[in-house]
Amino acid sequence: MIAPTQKTTPAAGTKNVSLFRTAEGKNYAFIFFMVTLLFLLWGVCNGMIDILNKHFQDSLHINKMQSAFVQFANYMGYFFMAIPSGMLARRYGYKGAILIGLLLVALGAFWFIPATHIGTYWSFLLGLFILATGLTCLETVANPYATVLGPPQTGAARINFAQSGNGVGWMIGPILGGQFVLSATSVANTSNADLYKPYLIVGIVVSLLFLGFLVCNVPDLHNMEETKVDTKSNAPVAVKPLIQRRHFVLAVAAQFFYVAAQTGVFSYFVNFINSDTPPLPEGVAKALPESWRALLANGTWHVTDQGASKLLSYGAFGLFLLGRFTGSMALRKFPAHLMLALYGVLSLASMVLIILPMGWISVFGLFASFFFMSIMYPTIFSLGIHGLGEQTKRAASYIVMAIVGGAIMPLFMGWLADQWGMRFGFLMPLLCFGFIAFYGFSWAALEAKDSGKAA
C-alpha cells in the first residue's frame, strides 16, 4: 500500500516528477506497460464496432437509428457490469479482476464464430454485450490503477499516457474490422460471413494476455486520502460519502456526456464522410498517389466504405492518438481541469463547424474533434477520483457505469440524422461538449469545497 502523501491537485507542480518511480524508490514501469496493453485491447475492440454501424445498415437493411443498437449493446454491457466490476476489484484485487475481465472478453470474441452461423442481429449484439462486460472489468481496474503506479502528482499525466495505448487500438480496430467486413468497392458488402475473423484474432490475443497476467506480479496498490482532523477535538473527521463529493458526482455526469459525444462522432464518421463530404475535382483526384486513389470510387471524392474506415483509422484516430501523446506531456505542466475546459470549448467549436454547411471546413471540424476529444475520458476519470482514498475502486465503478451514455445518446443522434440529415445529428455531441467544458471550469471550486479548503 502506498504511504499517505500530501494531497496535490492533478498536474500541479509536476515538471520534474517521475511518472513511475515513487518517493520510496519503487519503480512500476513494467506493470504500467502491462496495464497499457489492456488499454490497447479495448481500443481495438471499440474501434471495430465503429465500422459495424455502416456494415449492418447494408447487410441487414436497417436505418441509422437501428444501427445505433450496436453501441447500445456494447455500452449496456458497461452499465450492467460496472458495479459488479468494482465489487470484484475489492474482493479479488486488481489482478483477480483483470483475469476475470480477460476471460469475459475472450468468451465474447469467440462467440462471434457461432453468431456468424446464426446470422441474426441479436446474435451479434449478444457477442458485443458479453465482450463489453469483460472490457468493463478491465476499465474499472486499469483506469484507477494507472493513477497509483507512481507519484500521485503525475496521476493525470500517467493515465493519459496509458490511454495513448487506447488511441493506438482505436487506429487498429477500424483497419482490422474493415478489412474483413467493409467493401473495397462502391458496391456495399451485404454478407456477414467473415465477421467472425477479426474477433477470432482478438480472442487469441486476449488468451495470450491472460497467461501473461497470470504469471505477472500485480501489486494491489491503493490511492490514499489525506486524513482530516477536527481542530477543536483533534479527532479524525468522518469521510464524506461519495454522493456528497460534488467533484466526483459531476465527473460521473461529465463522463456520461463525453462517452455519448465520442460514440456519436466515432460511429457516424463513415456516414458523414459518405454523405456530407463535398466532391473532389476530377483533376485533383487523378493527381493523387495510387494508394490514395484506391480510397475513391470512379475517380471522384466518393469514398468507399473500406476507404472511409481507413480515413477513420489513419486520419481521425491518428489525430486522436497525437492528442493523447501531446496531452500527456501538457498535463505535466498545466492543471488538468483547465486542459479539460479548453479542449471542451474547442470540441464544441468543431461541432459548430460540422453542423454549418461549410464544405471542406466542416470536414476539417470533424477531424479536429478527434484531437480535442483525446484527453477527455482519462482526464475526467482522474479528476473524478482525485482524493477519494479507499473509496477509489467503488468510485471508479460508477464512473465506468457512466459509459452508458454511449448506449443512449447515439440513438438520439441517429434519430436526428434520419429526420434532418447527418450534419444535424452532430447537435447531440455539441451539447455534450458544452457540459464537459463547464465541468472543467468549475472543478477547482467543487474539489475545494469537497476537501474542506473552501470557506
Image (cartoon, rainbow, N blue to C red):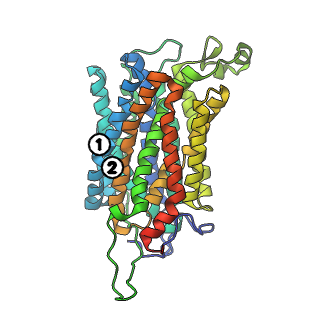
Observer-nearest of 153 and 383: 383
Question: Could you say where residue 407 lies in the image, as x and y percent from the top left?
Answer: 36, 37
Label count reads: 2
Q: Quadrant of residue 391?
A: bottom left
At horizontal 62% and vertical 68% (from top left) the residue drawn is 16
Q: Would you call the spot at circle 1 few (<14 residues within 10 Å), some (14-19), or many (20 or more)?
A: many
Residue at the far front: name it: 455
From the image, tell me which residue sits under label 1: 104
Q: Nearest the camera: 327 or 340?
A: 340
Residue position for label 2: 137
Asked whether residue 319 is in view, the answer is: no
Element carrying mark 1: helix
Q: Amino acid at mark 2?
A: Cys
The quadrant the N terminus occupies is bottom left
Q: Is residue 214 above or below residue 61?
A: below
Q: Are marks 1 and 2 in contact (CB under 8 Å)?
A: yes
In this rendering, the label closer to the viewer, 1 or 2 = 2
**Label 2's element?**
helix
Q: Is residue 289 left or right of residue 17?
A: right
Q: Nearer the viewer, residue 56 or 2?
A: 56
Residue 444 horizontal/vertical position (percent): 52, 64
Residue at 60% x, 20% y is 295
Q: Quadrant of residue 218?
A: bottom left
Q: CA distance from mark 1 to mark 2?
A: 9 Å
